[in-house]
């Protein structure tokens, strides 16, 4: 598979020559030969300096702090601060200021996945790695647009730590590393064999259980580490929470579950009363219509079907192997696999007569043009779970290779293969269009003079609930199969290159070749229109290859001053197109005193076009609002008073992929300091600034409609290329159509590079450790992030949008957390306080006040081998309420509606 790609790296006959040639490119032997000093046999060698590699650099250094700040979350932090998985821990980062669609968001494209938005730049601008290697994207794009990595299925049992690089790093890692890099590092060894069980939930729903087994073993030259995690979680429904179990708590109109309307007057007609439906939706159905105009409705119709926490069953396993070939060479391999079964629900099945065509019909029996609709209750289905969406997902990641030292030099190398695959199968229940129409309307009897269908409908069926078997007869199950995958070969090397007065200059270099792909395969029956109110983008997918060469140079310019330079060339190729990008980075470390580090960095970065944007077949939807400039002009209406201005909902659209997209380009710089007067106290302050140009956004419908009007009205040459393109994108009804002449039917759009995004802010971090004889040991941490500026510009001819003042933007302006950990003898405890800054309220007229949430955990060491813990999240049972936007009366996606959660945990070491 990779033979064609090797031409980009040179034809190398074997592994050893590959390594030699690669290193010699950056290591001229005559000029920079390493000096060696022979030591007498009886001379004691000095203690070896411990060097560590930190995310953001391929060069191992003695100091953990570098020119760009790195946040570290340990496995112990995850447990004692009350986090259930890697996503929970990352979601708690103060740098994570952006809004994302989570499991409680409802009708999202990805309710089975979780993502973060560092710096509010979206989930697609953070690179996620496992053990320093890329993993496959989630098969389904976030918000139907961009690709991202799912953080919901990485088990905590085998996580050693998570490192977050707070800045651009494409010169080290390539594409996506614009807002930052998340590197999830798995364990290489464990403290014996450990068994862990954790169980808990909320006071109403969401019960969960987790079992973990992990251990490590050394067998002569072979060492291995393994981990198994099994977990289950029950859903939490909106109906489980008093404040959101009804949509009419503030006097809102309930949802109609049975309705028969006169299409001409819009008035309800009689169905013989609502008595037959009184037992549905837990007995909440009432007739809110006038006499002879029945409108059977319930305030529980939506909350009954809404899950704010998905049901989840997961099984995860990990195996890591290291084999010492000799004292200089090591073989390694690790394999991670996870299976997940997820269920959620967002709405009840509904039906409106002939919704796919006219939406109304001529009732032969009454002589009226009528609209019928039904919303089905759990009692008619055999239970609310009957129509849950169900995902079966399988993800796996394999990494293996060889690493070692090169001869008697300071150089070391690593050659590795990494392969990752993610499959997702979705099953959902839907109404069969022909079955449900025929069930309520009967057979079509013809059409009237205007082509409107004529029926003698079954009022006897509309006026009573269905049985479970009847619902079964008008519904079916759809199946969608999605897959993504990625694989790569990587060769890296690093070592000393020449000596400077302040120390040895060090070089790291890397070469990569890779391939990635995805496929989306929805049910053909949906594409054929067999299901009511279900649509798909059709089957699509694609692959691309990538190649990269990069280098990083560390220069100790003077005893207190270090300079790091990095550069990387990336090339991405489709079958008929390719893009390339050169990025570079620089970092400066100044240590005027052993306790003080002053640092600065500058980097360019990029993101290769999202695979979904490149290969999308078609995605249908509608705009929030539309202005039809042509009809305003044709009807002689001034634009400011035109009835076709900003009509809502807007025109329908069809979005297709664009293989001519260019990379998004980022620039970032930062400056700050780290002060560590003792090994018990440190403080850091960092300023950061990130700008992205050529952001991908959809072609503006407003621009298309303006140009179309100018072309048709003679203000532009109608035969010009621009006019030909605009006229082809706008589909209208014929000017002589009986119904809605000249109305926009559809606008065909594509993604383009046009937008820009600029944000800057500060991060503050502090740690203080102290010990006492009488009260134990303490650790106090403080983290704070504040966004000072965030501006988005849709295109160069649009005004900049100030996100910090825009009440439609739901990002946090600042976040703060502090934790206090204590241990004394066999006891330990941690308190974590999170402060979330202000966000706009639901009706976007003002800001909601900041909110504080508290987590607490306590642990007792029963014996040297056993410990027990209690963990409580949201200790004071606070739920952020917001009634201004209506149901569900809280800021969806930003705050949890769960309230207090608690767990008991037991750990035993063999």
Image (spheres, rainbow, N blue to C red):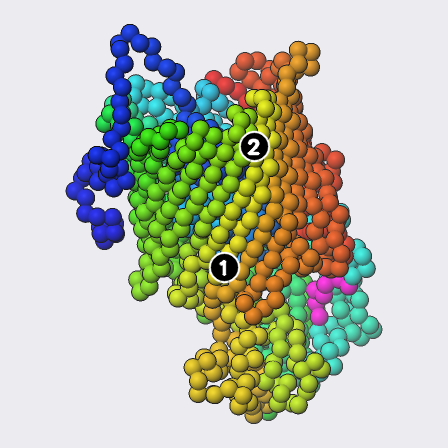
Q: CA distance from mark 1 to mark 2?
A: 31 Å
Residue 602 picture location, percent across and down: 48, 46
Q: Nearer the viewer, residue 125 or 621?
A: 125
The residue most toward the top is 42
Q: Is residue 60 left or right of residue 648?
A: left
Please tell me which residue is depicted at 77% across the width and 71% down the height of the picture.
294
Label 1 sits on a secondary structure element that is strand
Residue 806 falls within the magenta-colored stretch: no
How many residues crowd mark 1 within 10 Å: few (<14), some (14–19), many (20+)? Answer: some
Above or below, 747 against 524 in this view is below
Image point 52% across, 29% down: which residue? 592
Around disc 2, counting alpha carbons within 10 Å, would you say few (fewer than 14), some (14 to 19), or many (20 or more)? many
**Residue positioned 78% across, 74% down in the render:** 293
Disc marking residue 403: none
Mostly what secondary structure, the magenta segment? Answer: strand
Residue 866 placement: quadrant: top right
Front tag of 1 and 2? 2
Left or right of 45: which side holds 192? right
Q: Which numbered marker is on residue 693? A: 1
Can residue 696 be seen by looking at this rendering? yes
In reply to whether residue 257 is colored magenta, the answer given is yes
Counting from the top left corner in percent of width and height, residue 836 is at 68, 43
Residue holding disc 2: 674
Task: Say if residue 905 shows up in the picture.
Answer: no
Q: Residue furthest left?
A: 13
**Mark 2 falls on what kind of element?**
strand
Whether residues under marks 1 and 2 lie with C-beta atoms below 8 angstroms apart, the answer is: no
Q: Position of residue 169 (x, y in %)?
A: 45, 45
Earlier in the chain: of badge 1 and badge 2, it is 2
Residue drawn at point x = 28 percent, y = 40 percent:
26
State which region is magenta.
Answer: 253-259
- Camera-side residue of 191 and 10: 10
């Amino acid at each position: 598979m990779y033979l064609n790609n090797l031409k980009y790296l040179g034809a190398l006959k074997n592994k050893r020559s590959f390594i030699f040639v690669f290193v010699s490119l950056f290591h001229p032997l005559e000029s920079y030969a390493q000096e060696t000093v022979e030591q007498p046999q009886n001379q004691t060698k000095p203690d070896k300096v411990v060097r560590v590699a930190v995310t953001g650099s391929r060069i191992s250094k003695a100091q953990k702090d570098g020119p760009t700040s790195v946040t570290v979350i340990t496995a112990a932090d995850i447990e004692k601060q009350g986090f259930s998985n890697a996503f929970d821990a990352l979601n708690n980062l103060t740098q994570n200021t952006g809004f994302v669609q989570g499991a409680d968001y409802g009708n999202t494209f990805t309710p089975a996945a979780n993502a973060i938005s560092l710096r509010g730049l979206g989930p697609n601008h953070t690179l996620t790695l496992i053990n320093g290697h890329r993993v496959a994207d989630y098969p389904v794009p976030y918000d139907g647009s961009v690709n991202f990595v799912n953080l919901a299925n990485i088990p905590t049992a085998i996580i050693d730590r998570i490192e977050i690089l707070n800045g651009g790093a494409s010169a080290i890692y390539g594409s996506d590393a614009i807002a930052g890099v998340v590197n999830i590092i798995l364990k290489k060894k464990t403290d014996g064999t450990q068994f862990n069980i954790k169980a808990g939930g909320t006071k109403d729903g969401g019960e969960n259980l987790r079992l973990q087994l992990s251990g490590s073993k050394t067998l002569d030259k072979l060492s291995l580490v393994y981990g198994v995690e099994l977990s289950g979680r029950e859903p939490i429904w909106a109906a489980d929470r008093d404040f959101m179990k009804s949509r009419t708590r503030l006097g809102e109109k309930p949802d109609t579950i049975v309705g028969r309307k006169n299409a001409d007057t819009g008035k309800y007609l009689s169905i013989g009363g609502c008595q037959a439906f009184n037992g549905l939706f837990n007995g909440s159905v009432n007739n809110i219509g006038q006499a002879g105009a029945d409108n059977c409705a319930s305030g529980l119709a939506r909350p009954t079907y809404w899950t704010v926490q998905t049901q989840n069953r997961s099984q995860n396993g990990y195996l890591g192997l290291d084999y010492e070939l000799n004292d200089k060479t090591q073989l390694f391999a690790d394999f991670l696999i996870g299976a997940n079964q997820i269920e959620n629900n967002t709405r009840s099945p509904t039906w409106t007569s002939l919704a796919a065509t006219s939406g109304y019909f001529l009732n032969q029996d009454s002589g009226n043009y009528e609209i019928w609709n039904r919303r089905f209750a759990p009692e008619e289905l055999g239970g609310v779970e009957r129509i849950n969406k169900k995902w079966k997902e399988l993800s796996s990641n394999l990494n293996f290779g060889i690493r070692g030292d090169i001869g008697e030099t300071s150089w070391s190398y690593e050659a590795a293969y990494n392969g990752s695959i993610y499959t997702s199968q979705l099953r959902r229940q839907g109404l069969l269009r022909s079955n449900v129409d025929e069930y309520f309307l009967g057979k079509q009897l013809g059409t009237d003079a205007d082509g409107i269908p004529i029926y003698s409908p079954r009022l006897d069926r509309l006026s009573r609930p269905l049985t479970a078997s009847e619902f079964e007869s008008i519904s079916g199950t759809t199946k969608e199969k999605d897959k993504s995958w990625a694989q790569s070969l990587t060769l890296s090397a690093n070592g000393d290159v020449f000596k400077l007065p302040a120390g040895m200059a060090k070089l790291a270099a890397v070469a990569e070749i890779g391939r990635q792909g995805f496929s989306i395969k929805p049910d053909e029956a949906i594409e054929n229109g067999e299901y009511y109110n279900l649509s798909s983008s059709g089957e699509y997918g694609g692959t691309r290859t990538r190649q990269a060469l990069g280098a990083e140079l560390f220069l100790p310019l003077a005893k207190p001053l270090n300079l790091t330079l990095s550069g990387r060339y990336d090339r991405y190729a489709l079958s008929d197109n390719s893009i390339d990008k050169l990025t570079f980075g620089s970092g400066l470390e100044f240590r005027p005193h052993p306790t003080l580090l002053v640092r600065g960095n500058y980097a360019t970065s990029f993101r290769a076009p999202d695979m979904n944007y490149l290969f999308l077949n078609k995605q249908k939807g509608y705009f929030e609002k539309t202005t039809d400039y042509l009809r305003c002009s044709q009807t002689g209406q001034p634009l400011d008073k035109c009835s076709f201005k900003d009509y809502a909902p807007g025109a329908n659209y069809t979005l297709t992929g664009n293989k001519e997209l260019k990379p998004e380009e980022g620039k970032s710089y930062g400056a700050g300091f780290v002060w560590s007067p003792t090994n018990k106290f440190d403080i850091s302050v960092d300023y950061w600034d990130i700008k992205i140009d050529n952001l991908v956004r959809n072609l503006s419908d407003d621009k298309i409609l303006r140009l179309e009007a100018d072309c048709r009205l003679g203000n532009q040459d109608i035969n010009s290329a621009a006019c030909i393109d605009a006229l082809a994108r706008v589909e209208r009804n014929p000017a002589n159509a009986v119904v809605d002449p000249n109305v926009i039917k559809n606008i065909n759009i594509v993604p383009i590079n046009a937008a820009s995004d600029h944000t800057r802010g500060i991060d503050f971090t502090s740690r203080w450790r102290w010990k006492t004889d009488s009260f134990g040991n303490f650790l106090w941490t403080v983290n704070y992030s504040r966004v000072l500026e965030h501006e988005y510009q849709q295109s160069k001819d649009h005004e900049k949008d100030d996100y910090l003042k825009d009440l439609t933007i739901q990002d946090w302006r600042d976040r703060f957390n502090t934790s206090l950990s204590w241990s004394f003898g066999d006891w330990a405890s941690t308190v974590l306080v999170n402060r979330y800054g202000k966000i706009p309220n639901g009706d976007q007229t003002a800001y909601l006040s900041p909110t504080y949430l508290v987590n607490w955990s306590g642990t007792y060491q029963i014996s040297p081998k056993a410990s027990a813990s209690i963990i409580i999240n949201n200790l004071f049972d606070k739920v952020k309420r917001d009634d201004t936007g209506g149901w569900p009366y809280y800021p969806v996606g930003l705050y949890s509606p769960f309230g207090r959660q608690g767990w008991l945990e037991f750990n035993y070491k063999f």
